[in-house]
Amino acid sequence: MKTTISIEKTKSERTRHPEDQLGFGKYFADHMFIAEYSEGSWKEARIVPYGPLSLDPGASVFHYGQALFEGMKAFRGQNDRIHLFRPDFHVRRLAHGAEKLCMPSVPAELFTEAVEALVKVDSSWIPKSEGSALYLRPTLIGTESFLGVRPSQKYLFFIITSPVGPYYSEGFNPVKIWIERSRVRAAVGGLGDIKAGANYAASLAASTAAKKKDFAQVLWLDSMERKYIEEVGTMNVFFKINDEVITPALNGSILAGATRDCVIQLLKSWNIPVTERKISIDEVFDAHKTGQLKEVFGSGTAAVVSSVGELADQDHRITINNNQVGDLTKKLLNEITSIQLGKKSDPFGWVKVLES
Amino acid sequence: MKTTISIEKTKSERTRHPEDQLGFGKYFADHMFIAEYSEGSWKEARIVPYGPLSLDPGASVFHYGQALFEGMKAFRGQNDRIHLFRPDFHVRRLAHGAEKLCMPSVPAELFTEAVEALVKVDSSWIPKSEGSALYLRPTLIGTESFLGVRPSQKYLFFIITSPVGPYYSEGFNPVKIWIERSRVRAAVGGLGDIKAGANYAASLAASTAAKKKDFAQVLWLDSMERKYIEEVGTMNVFFKINDEVITPALNGSILAGATRDCVIQLLKSWNIPVTERKISIDEVFDAHKTGQLKEVFGSGTAAVVSSVGELADQDHRITINNNQVGDLTKKLLNEITSIQLGKKSDPFGWVKVLES
Ligand SMILES: Cc1ncc(COP(=O)(O)O)c(C=O)c1O
Ligand SMILES: Cc1ncc(COP(=O)(O)O)c(C=O)c1O
């Protein structure tokens, strides 16, 4: 089923910035996609010039946190073609999140056609230099104006796009991660496994405190026993202990990252042992003490694969792999990036190449 | 320090509805207050006609849940004067929440002057009939357009007002409450003790499921052991066991309700034993079995004091006080309402009477 998406082109182009000064999520391309949901169906799918949304001050998103998003990337691939990375994964995750937040899901066709039409309209905004991409932010918000606490009956689905460079100011150098011991991002039974705005609200104080100590992000521990590792602020996390790679098993409070899934699939294809299981922070410290902790890295759409050079809390401070990017970390980053750009074949079917 | 608040009166009045058909949070009065925060200070405090907000689609509130609110009431008191209920409590709680969400706090003077100016401009919207009020919704949201995860550097503080009747469709008759056994609203170390939109996002699926079973709201249990009572969807909760009244102690994941505080102060002044402590759902069932559970009620700005007639989960279903509003519940509701309206004296200094 083909959705009709109307397109209104901008009359005043937005300022473009040099590719080496993009940063992350600071600048936006010329257009955005938008569609409205009411009375049980999606309406008025359209691409319009990027610009402000007009919302009633009683809208659910301002009061009851009905806000859910996705983060995915488009690349300028071989022969100048547009490469979308794992759009199917993102539409499924958005649907799962929508269900948990009592929002209508965005039909896969609508999502796919919207993303494709939008990146085509703004294809000139896809940066070309290594480590850069056009970041897409599909967002679903409740818009009904009503102050009783219940799900909204009206929604807005929009997609904005931002040309981005590396997520961390460190570039692809190792980052320092602070272990958060008191605050909790999400509990089992809560919203941790979806990209709800609510989880990020719960994370801001911890990450701000970590940044003040000069750490890039925090490592979250489980909410019950405060000892099992969950994930990093905007990344899933992996530990190479001897020759095995370990990542926390998805337990309902960890986000199932698209990049996490890439890493696991790649490791398996390389016959490197990879295990999803509970792993405590003490196990990591012990492995470090005995010299068995070889590499630590995070995975995420924004940061791709990011080396962790230091892990610390009040009482500990360990340096990993001499604060150098490890070989496996480097290999994973290189492999994923190469597949994204079409420099290597794509045995997993992650890349959708758009016909122009 | 006096803030200058400019006032732009509406040119087209909004539709008014009969006081017996108000419901809760459906209709809004003619004006709203609004102020903007950027570069470290609050600017352009103004009262304008109620209408849509214009926000960049990259605004923090749409992505990272920087949304915090208050709920308070204005009444039409004796001699037709305007009574504000506990504005000081609400400005303090908003400040506490702002800190946890890394938002700038709204200065007490700005809050107070804004609330007072707004209810005066829209004083004709304060309903007069018993059980009704003008509900005020001060709201603080992040508005900076930036997709890296960090606190916004721009905010909007607005207040909208809604003439309301009783919160529950049951009116002041006992409500049925469903005990939520699997989902979690908030964990210790999270945002449960503030009025963050995030908490309500986490509550929608549970309350929607409860409503489908014909229950008004859910009772939340603690996130760690899933047995200690926390609170009800939009109310704190009290159990009268024999002659003692017990309410869960504030543990960091329960909202410290203004009405909860009123109830505790009133009970103390009446020399009725009231205890803030951990109380498990099993203790409540046991007290019911032995005939010692006399009354259960919730407290909240919206519902004031609301009798709970039934508590149930998959395996239990208990009826409390024969599904009748208990004497103490009735007395508390009556006392608080009388103080709010100025029919009784206000020994606690809860009411701020506005000079007209
Ligand atoms: C909390 C959190 N964990 C993990 C990730 C990684 O997920 P993905 O690889 O899908 O980007 C993200 C994504 O940005 C995130 O926000
Ligand atoms: C989660 C929650 N608990 C308790 C309450 C009661 O708080 P208050 O008495 O301040 O209205 C509310 C308020 O609406 C609430 O939303």
Image (tube, coloured by chain):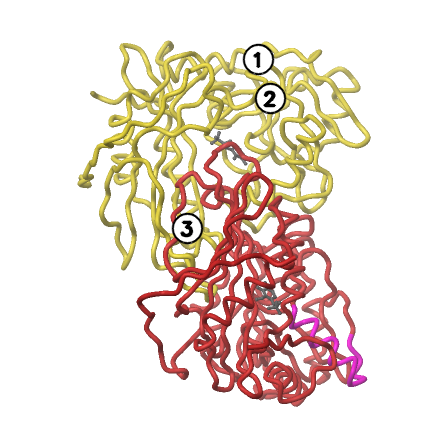
Chain colours: A yellow, B red
Instruction: Tell me the amino acid under the disc marked 3.
Output: Glu
Q: Which mark is residue A328?
A: 1
At 59% across and 69% down in the image, what residue appears?
Answer: B235
Q: Quadrant of the N terminus of chain A?
A: top left
A198 or A100, nearer to the observer: A198
Q: Where is residue A356 in the image (x, y as percent from the top left)?
A: 20, 20
Earlier sequence position, callout 1 versus callout 2: 2
Q: In which quarter of the image is residue A91?
A: top left
Tell whether circle 2 marks a residue whose Cβ is less than 8 angstroms from ligand 1.
Answer: no
Q: Which of B192 and A91 is in front in this view?
A: B192
- Badge 1: residue crowd in 10 Å (few <14, some 14–19, many ≥20): some
Residue under pointer 2? A297
Callouts 2 and 3 on one subunit: yes
Q: Where is residue B135 in the image (x, y as percent from the top left)?
A: 50, 71
Q: Residue A99 carries which label?
A: 3
Q: In this view, does B268 lie above or below A295?
A: below
Provide the residue span drawn in magenta. B258-274
Q: Is mark 2 on a helix, strand or loop?
A: strand
